Amino acid sequence: MHGMSFHGGVAETILFDGWHINDVSGMISSAIGIILLTALYEGLKSYREYLFARTEFFKKNQRKSRNVLLFSRVHFFQTLLHVIQVVLGYFIMFIFMTFNYWLCIAVGVGTAVGYWLFAWEKTNNNNTDCCS
């Protein structure tokens, strides 16, 4: 058991007893997996924002009752994606809370890679709805 301070090393248990690493190759493969997991989290976040924007467009162009939208397939799908996003977010938080700086760096790199891959449209967005 490690203290509540940042540390290095390659002996770590990550999330589950079955995900225990003891050597450099285990740390490298785990870091790559964490980078992919965190990038997936960022991609899921961007996809949910995209779906939300499309749903808002749909709601503006259709006059449907609140109950129809509440029980729509899109809303159920959004709910499922939200649950997956929250669980992945907690997994990533728990990985960071190992305080192993190699794993923390992997989380940071994964966040950067995920944002770079999936949120690049935000920088090209000419949407001025917020300010008009």
Image (spheres, grey):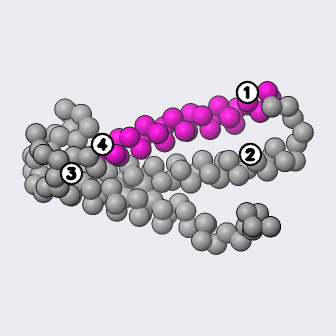
Residue most extreme to the right = 63
Residue 17 lies in what quarter of the image?
top left
Residue 15 pos. (x, y %): 26, 38
Residue at (33% x, 55% y) in the render: 107
SS for tag 2? helix
Q: How many callouts does the rendering have?
A: 4
Nearer mark to the viewer, of 1 and 3: 3
Task: Give the residue at mark 4.
Answer: 94
Disc 4 versus disc 2: nearer the observer: 4
Residue at label 2? 55
Other residues around mark 1 within 10 Å, as few (<14) / some (14–19) / many (≥20): few
Q: Earlier in the sequence, mark 3 or mark 2?
A: 2
* Residue to which mark 3 is pinned: 99
The image quadrant of residue 91 is top left
Mark nearest the camera among 1 and 4 is 4
| Classed neighbour count for the residue bearing mark 2: other residues with Cα under 10 Å, few (<14), some (14–19), many (≥20) | some
Q: Position of residue 104 (x, y in %)?
A: 27, 56
Q: What amino acid is found at the position of numbered circle 2 in the picture?
A: Thr
The dominant secondary structure in magenta is helix
Asked whether the beta carbons under mark 3 and mark 4 sit within 8 Å of each other, the answer is no
List the residue tagged with mark 1.
71
Specify which label sits upstream in the sequence, 1 or 4: 1
Q: Residue at x 45, y 49 (%)?
A: 41
Q: Amino acid at mark 3?
A: Phe
Query: Between marks 2 and 1, how big is the CA–CA gap?
Result: 13 Å
Distance CA(mark 3)–CA(mark 4):
9 Å
Q: Reply above or below: 126 against 26.
A: below
